Amino acid sequence: MGKNKRIRKIVSIIIAICVSIVAFSATIPPYDNIPPPFRKPQTDITHSMNAEFDSLSKIFGKNKIIPKRLEKQIIYALSFFPELININIEFRVVTGDDGIISTRPVISSVFKKSSNRSYIVFIQDSSINRKLPSFVNGPVNGQVGILGHELCHIIYFNNHSGFGLIGLGVNHISTRYMDNFENKTDSMDIERGLGYQLIDWGEYLRERFQKMTNNTGPRPLFEAPGRERYMSTASIKRVMAKSKIYQ
């Protein structure tokens, strides 16, 4: 076999493997077998968050790097996810003009055992030129709700292999896949008991987006016609109405 043919064959094999990985990842429902909630839902968690902070931080602060000014919200959100107690997570406040909150695995840990992986939750602070709503300016109740959404991502990431994570990264280019992925993440957050908090976060974003656009600009992604990447208030309430934990 000539050199060029060998190269083409190798490239074809690599492409086939990548396609298989992506296809495998794309067909997996984002969250299966959601466990019962660790905590009961509350309309407003502010009192419990303050009252329980000292006791919860001893349990859920393990292996976590948490900015001082957000530690109560973060610790309380973590208390809904006991399976993350031993997972290394850094919550990092960053200043920028775009994004609100996002999560990714530390690149060097992607191919490690899931128990040895590390993750970073990027929390956007305000900046002079910032146009998007800022996490730190949101209501505390809502902050806990969206933190829960990000922690659901970590559970998903930690249940997949390094190749599965690469497949997910590739699938970010698919709008349809990401709409489904984020929508199901909201479902998991609700089933964990943070439905009321997710509603508060969504209402905060809607109010801010309306002020930004004066009702004349594009509608937020969770209200775009024909799609719903992030659940609207009505959708969250429908899921809650069907869930036993909110009865």
Image: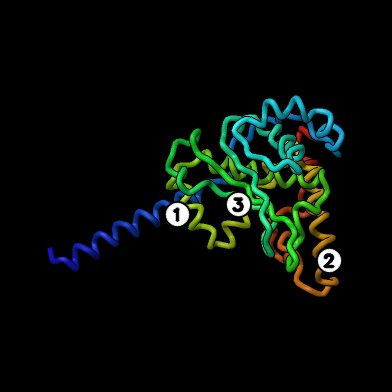
Eye-nearest disc, 2 or 1: 2
Mark 3 lies on a secondary structure that is helix
Give me the residue at 73% from left, 28% from top: 56
- Report crowding for label 3: few under 14, some 14 to 19, many 20 or more residues within 10 A (C-alpha): many
Amino acid at the residue labelled 2: Gln
Q: Indicate the quadrant containing the N terminus: top left, top right, bottom left or bottom right.
A: bottom left
Q: Position of residue 89 (x, y in %)?
A: 59, 40
Q: Is residue 176 left or right of residue 54?
A: left
**Viewer-proximal residue, 226 or 169?**
169
Question: Who comes first in sequence, dot 3 or dot 2?
Answer: 3
Q: Which residue is mark 2?
A: 210
* Image quarter of residue 221: bottom right
- The answer to whether mark 2 and mark 1 are in CB contact below 8 A is no
Vertical position of residue 103 compared to residue 33: above or below: below
Give me the residue at 79% from left, 44% from top: 197
Amino acid at the residue labelled 3: Phe
Q: Position of residue 125 (x, y in %)?
A: 72, 55
**Viewer-proximal residue, 240 or 49?**
49
**Viewer-proximal residue, 183 or 172?**
172
Disc 3/disc 1 C-alpha distance (Å): 14 Å
Q: Which residue is mark 1?
A: 22
Q: Position of residue 218 (x, y in %)?
A: 75, 71
Q: Which residue is mark 3?
A: 181
Give me the residue at 53% from left, 41% from top: 118
Give me the residue at 56% from left, 37% from top: 88
